Amino acid sequence: MNPAFGQIMEPTDTTRELSRDIDKRAISQLEAIRLITKESFDKVKYTPDITVWDTVDMFQSPDVTLERGTGDCEDVSFLIASIIKGLERQKVDSVRVAIGDYREPFRAIVTHAWVEVRIGERWYICEGTTGETMNAPFFKYVPYLALYKDKLKFIKTYWKED
């Protein structure tokens, strides 16, 4: 069930259909990514991999995430990224799934996945586990790996194209 990294964010027939719907409704790129993030959150119930697959971590494709209606942070992030990459009218400059630390004051640091999107000179974080889209850099998110351009890369500088 672990799709190849280079293919997991590519739009599928199903995610392209969702992209076309968003393209029709959104009046800006930012509104498009906000709608995609919120609607993906509404469609997918957060469920840890151990519950579904009986293993600590398993990547599932966006289509499987939609079919099951469940997934964890990287699953919904791959879904969001796939839909964003399928946009035509509201196409963004860059989209990547980041993996890194999520930090809350007085709480444990956890490894997490989220989507980072660049529109012009601004970066945005699309948080699939809450449905929120926010300006980056956001102090709680510290990325160290990014999946984009069919590669998994270490991030040297936050919220810049490496």
Image: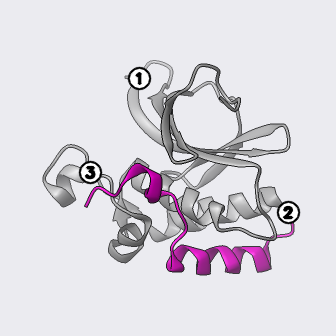
Which residue lies under the disc numbered 3? 58
Q: Are marks 2 and 3 in contact (CB under 8 Å)?
A: no
Q: Amino acid at mark 3?
A: Met
- Is residue 120 covered in magenta? no
x%, y% of residue 76? 46, 57
Give the mark nearest the N terminus, 1 or 3: 3
| Residue denoted by label 2 | 28
Q: Nearer the viewer, mark 2 or mark 3?
A: 3
Q: Quadrant of residue 60?
A: bottom left
Q: What amino acid is at disc 1?
A: Arg
Secondary structure under the numbered disc 2 in the rendered image = loop
Highlighted range, magenta: 1-28
- Say few, some or many: other residues with alpha carbon within 10 Å of mark 1 (under 14 / 14 to 19 / 20 or more): few
Q: Is residue 152 above or below residue 47?
A: above
Q: Indicate which disc, 1 or 2, sits on the residue closer to the N terminus.
A: 2
Q: Is residue 25 magenta?
A: yes
